[in-house]
Structure formats: structure tokens, C-alpha cells
Image (tube, rainbow, N blue to C red):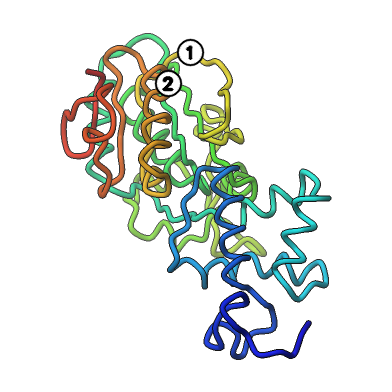
Amino acid sequence: MSNAPPDASTGSFAGLLERDLLLTDADFTRVSQLIYQRAGIVLAPHKRDMVYSRLGRRVRSLGLTRFSDYLTRLELHGNATEWIAFTNALTTNLTSFFREAYHFPLLAQHVTGRRGPVRVWSAAASTGEEVWSIAITLLETLGPQADIEVLGTDIDTEALRRARAGIYPQELLRDMDTGRLKRFFLKGAGQHSGFARVRPELTSRVRFGELNLVAPAWQDSEPFDAIFCRNVMIYFDRATQARVLDRLAACLKPDGLLFAGHSENFSQISTRFRLRGQTVYTLS
């Protein structure tokens, strides 16, 4: 590593003070290009510290001190495992049980009285809280004998591992109704004290899978009664948003619902959907 003072090609002093790794402007641009190509994620300039913090762990793990060396190794010799680690490091997982709670009564109303299979997809499942919230809503609405399937997908393999485990600190469940807690979760004891596990009544109706929403193709599937794609489009540019929305439209039943995040507006992006309620859409 050179001891020469940083210039326009290597970044400012402010970006290097008290840091053990070198992340230049050119490195940040390369990172931004690679994550956009692989996941459609747009990294704004203010995400530089996030890149340093999260991706820096991978740089250090390989015994490197410069992001440029890591990126060169990744592009020239990176195996599938390292590309997955790169992608996982740069995805954001912010979720909770019954987040944006007003959506779940709308889902319950939508499926009430249905006798055939009911299928719902969480397209950005993260660590699973949204998926389990959907499954709870469906079971409470349709009863234990109902034919229910909830699919949870995400690009982040580490988040999916935690989602599949279905084990959460009890503090994450503190706002949940006591009746729901007793019915759908097992309270940990002994070495598992302070944690709760999702009961088999839910896990038998849920499956998880890895999916990149900007991948060239998705696995064919039967259409869904509802799709939750909340707080993920904000990481895409407008062209990518339009492409993903067109593909989501093809995955919905004619009367299906698409649930968006509280800060997302799909009406201005795609003509395939029309607004039905607060951040809830149906096919045009």
C-alpha cells in the first residue's frame, strides 16, 4: 500500500482517516456497477460508508487491505460462494412481524370465503417475519384445514437461512397479541431461553427459496392470490422497477393483489396495475 498522499484518483483524506482499508472513488464505482449488474440495486453516493463497513468484512477475511484488490480477485477468480457473499453484504434486511400492519386485514378480507388453494408470495422475504405474518393471517382467516401455501424468496442467502430456521428473539415478538404467540410460537427454555420458534402449523405451509428479482428468468409457478413486494423497489432504478412489475403482473391471478411499501408508488411506473387502496394494487 502506497504512502503517497491521496489525490483525486484515490479519494480524500476524510475517507481514509482512521481506516484500515483503502476504498477509493473508483472502487466505489466498481462496487456500484457490480451490484447493479447482479441484483439491480442502485447504490447512491451516501452509501459509501455502508459499503466500507459491510463489504470490508469480506476484504479483511481474505487478508487484503485494498478494495481494488478484492474487486479484481472477485471479477477474475471469484467463485459462486464469494459472489453470494458480495451480494449478501450489500443487501438491506429491515423487517418485523406485521410491519405496515394495515395490509394484513386487507389480505384477510381478500381471501375470506375462498375454498380452493390460496397462494401468497413474499418476494423480498428477508429473515422471514413478513412470511410468517402472512401465514398467520391466512390461518386465522381460513382455518387449520385450509389449503394454504406461502412462498418466501430473497436474494440474500444468509437472511433466508435465518428465515427457514424460524427462531427469533422474544423481544421481536413483544408487540404481538398473546393469543397469537401461544398459538403460533413455541417458547424456548434452557439454553434457548429468550427465543421463540415458529410452530409446525406454520412451517408446514411455508417454503423459502433464493430468487434474484432481476434474474433473466424466474421459475414458472401457478399464479398467486396476492404478492407482497414491499420496500424493495426503492433500491432499483425506474427501468428495472418497470421490468419487475411487468413480471409480477404475470404471476398474479386476475383478481390478485400486489402489496407495496409505504413509500412506493407503482402507478407512476407501470400501466399493468391500478391503485386499489393504501399501497395496494390490482391488475388494470
In the image, is residue 44 above or below residue 203? below
In the image, is residue 188 above or below residue 152? below
Badge 2 amino acid: Arg
Q: Between marks 1 and 2, how big is the CA–CA gap?
A: 9 Å
Task: Name the image quarter holding residue 23.
Answer: bottom right
Task: Name the image quarter holding residue 56.
Answer: bottom right
Q: Is residue 133 left or right of residue 18?
A: left
Residue drawn at x 22%, y 26% as measured from the top left: 109
Residue 11 x, y percent position in the rendering: 57, 78
Residue drawn at x 52%, y 87% as measured from the top left: 14
Q: Which mark is residue 119?
A: 2
Quadrant occupied by the N terminus: bottom right
User: Which dot, 1 or 2, sits closer to the camera?
Assistant: 1
Q: Which mark is residue 280?
A: none
Residue designated by label 1: 222
Residue drawn at x 62%, y 51% as measured from the top left: 87
Closer to us: 127 or 112: 127
Residue 186 x, y percent position in the rendering: 53, 48
Closer to us: 242 or 277: 242
Q: Is residue 270 left or right of residue 34?
A: left
Badge 1 amino acid: Glu
Instruction: State the residue lying farthest toward the front.
Output: 8
**Element under disc 2:** strand
| CB atoms of marks 1 and 2 within 8 Å | yes
Q: Is residue 152 left or right of residue 81?
A: left
**Element under disc 1:** loop
